[in-house]
Amino acid sequence: PFYGNGTSERLFDIGLCLPSGPTLTDEDIRRVVDTIRAI
């Protein structure tokens, strides 16, 4: 596997990872939005 120079790992550590993709249901999206609004 490719490990690179660690940039992606650092960005992951400080970033916000949101679920995405064509299989997300409306319920999944509502749960994500509700969670973000609660923060």
Image: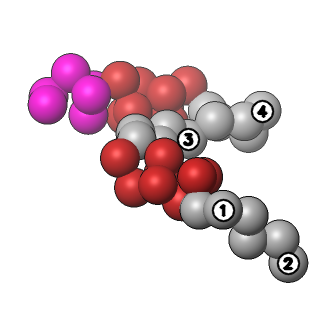
Q: Is residue 25 magenta?
A: no
Tell me the amino acid under the disc marked 2.
Pro
* Position of residue 15 in the picture relative to residue 1 (left or right): left
How far apart in space, not on screen, are marks 2 and 3 (Cα)?
Answer: 24 Å
Relative vertical location of residue 14 with respect to residue 39 in this rendering, above or below: below
Q: CA distance from mark 2 to mark 4?
A: 27 Å
Which residue is labeled 1 in the image? 5
Q: Position of residue 31 (x, y in %)?
A: 37, 34
Mark 1 residue type: Asn
* Disc number placed over residue 22 in the picture, else none: 4
Residue drawn at the location 74% of the way across and 64% of the way down: 4
Which residue, given by chain and number where applicable, does mark 3 sit on?
19
Residue at far bottom of view: 1
| For discs 1 and 4, the disc positioned in front in the rendered view | 1
Q: Amino acid at mark 3?
A: Pro
Callout 1: helix, strand or loop? loop
Q: How many marks?
A: 4
Q: Name the residue beneath numbered marker 2.
A: 1
**Nearer to us in this view, 4 or 15:** 4
36 in the magenta segment = yes
At 72% across and 36% down in the image, what residue appears?
A: 21
